[in-house]
Image (cartoon, rainbow, N blue to C red):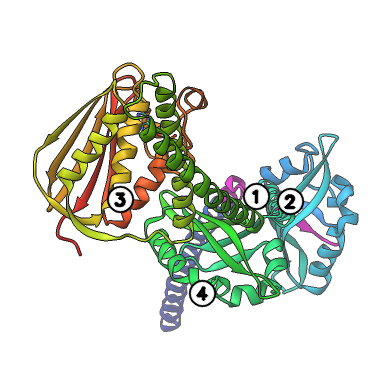
Amino acid sequence: MRMDKDLRIQELEKELEESHKKREMLEKQLSDYDKNQAQLKEEIYQLKGLIYSSTALITFLKGPDYRIEFANSPIIKVWGKGDDVVGKPLFEVIPEVREQGIQDYLDQVYYKGEPYHAQSLPIEHNVNGEPVKSYFDFSYMPQYNSEGKIVGVGVIAQDVTQQATLHQKVRKSEMEFRGLVNFMPHKISIADADGNSVFYNKSWLDYSGMTMDEFLDSHWTDIIHPDHKEKVEAELEECLSSGKTLDLELKVKDKNGDYKWHLCRAIAMKDDGIITSWISSSTEIQKLKEEEQRKEDFLKLVSHELKTPVTSIKGYVQLLQSTLNGSENKITKPYLYRIEDQVERLIRLISEMLDLSRIEQNELELNIEEFSLNEHVEHIIEDISYTHKDVQIELEHLCECDVKADKDRIGQVIINFITNALKYSPETKRVQVKVFHEQNNNVAVSVKDFGIGIEKKDLNRIFNRFYRVSAENEKTYAGFGIGLYLSNEIIERHNGKIFVDSEPGVGSEFTFVLPLNQN
Ligand code: ADP
């Protein structure tokens, strides 16, 4: 009996111990569960914070009537129906979007489980009673319960109205630009930074007879006249590497194979100083060129026809002068000198005109001989002083040298410099001429006056054909604007250079430099 009792006590103690262990285990499980719950709560809290603070538009629509289970404040703001929307079916809140495809998209997700994504989708809705058109990037995703059954649709969207409007504006302006560029009679093209064409306007396509693809596949220099190709390619290369503007006159082949003159300009487009593309405009100048040619031919003809009678007038005048020499006829003599002076001017003008057309047709030939530059300058000054009694021409030889050049042509340049110096010095008829050595084995002749001078902006242009400084001067000082153009051409053909230094109201100094020892 005693034994039974002890055994029973032992059993009870064991049971007690086990139930202690069980209790400890249960307490541990309970504490773990509490911890998990707290962690879960924390995580949900963080997730909600993320959703609420997101700028994306987020909502969860539950059940077949798409009841708003949850919506963050950005989407509530976009709907514009007030804050009291949670718990209501979506199409009760914003009925106006149902017929814009939204119901179909939601049904596709809810009933078929197919997610739906859209970009820049236009939606018209009423915000605070006002109709508004906005653009959205959308993602509709099916939401499942723990048994894998679809219970609703999750929506994440982004309002991209600003970008879409900007995009539309860019597209519109691009369309307008294309319209404008195609409407223009000028030939416009665009090339990339390396000069590879990427666009030709309609005028180019009409002229070349090629389609855009054909034109882009070919190289545009293929339609340049063979005589101009080398020069164009060299200029092009220089412009591409330096970024300087291309400015050329060249002949371009049309669809019939005829070459026509064009004035072609290309300008570099830069972003932050880096060339991004080239825009070029080519204008047909064929008619202008033909007219110019006709004008030149006419000038040449007139000058030729005038030369013979004017030269014979000069001969008769000189004959009359010599027959009157020694006679007492004081009335006729001065008139004959005046006639001679005027005829001289006429002859000079005619030969300038002829030279001009010779230069244009590349027919100006140089007769090179060796002569003393100092003596040549001296003789010219003597001749001019003989006919211009009231002037003072000072000559200074800072070097003595012989040159190999065309004597008459160099004389023509010196005469042009001196007669201009006298012509454009109405007050002081004083001119200083110098012959001197220039660095690098060059010789120079300078002609300095104390006349009206030339403004800085005109200094480069006075060497252009027919360029005269101002209309006002045209009336006061007779001339045609040919002399300096010819002088520059003559000196360049001798591999020399012309310089001018001038100050308005103070005077000008024209200098030409010739290389010595050239063959
Ligand atoms: P032209 O004297 O016949 O007009 P040029 O070609 O010799 O033609 O000269 C071109 C222009 O340069 C002149 O019209 C004048 O305006 C200017 N020019 C030339 N030389 C001088 C000078 N010494 N002083 C001031 N202006 C000058």
Ranked by sequence position, the earlier of labels 4 and 1 is 1
- Name the residue that disc number 2 marks: 135
For numbered disc 3, what is the local secondary structure? helix
Seen from the viewer's position, the closer of residues 162 and 86 is: 162
How far is disc 2 from disc 3 in space, using C-alphas?
81 Å
Q: Residue 159: in sight, yes or no?
A: no
Crowdedness near tag 2: few (<14), some (14–19) or many (≥20) residues, C-alpha within 10 Å: some
Q: Which mark is residue 163?
A: 1
Among the two numbered marks 3 and 4 on one chain, the one whose residue lies closer to the N terminus: 4
Write down the residue under mark 4. Answer: 226
Residue at mark 2 to residue at mark 4: CA–CA distance: 56 Å
Amino acid at dot 3: Asp
**Residue 13 quadrant:** bottom left
Discs 1, 2 touching: Cβ within 8 Å: yes
Residue position marked by numbered label 3 in the rendering: 408
**Disc 3 versus disc 4: nearer the observer:** 3
Position of residue 183 in the picture relative to residue 290 (left or right):
right
- Looking at the image, tell me whether mark 1 or mark 2 is earlier in sequence order: 2
Tell me the SS state at disc 4.
helix
Image coordinates for residue 419, horizontal then vertical, percent: 34, 33
Q: Nearer the viewer, residue 506 or 84?
A: 506
Image point 47% across, 25% down: which residue?
A: 473
Which amino acid type is shown beneath numbered disc 2?
Tyr
Report the Cα–Cα distance between label 3 and label 4: 36 Å
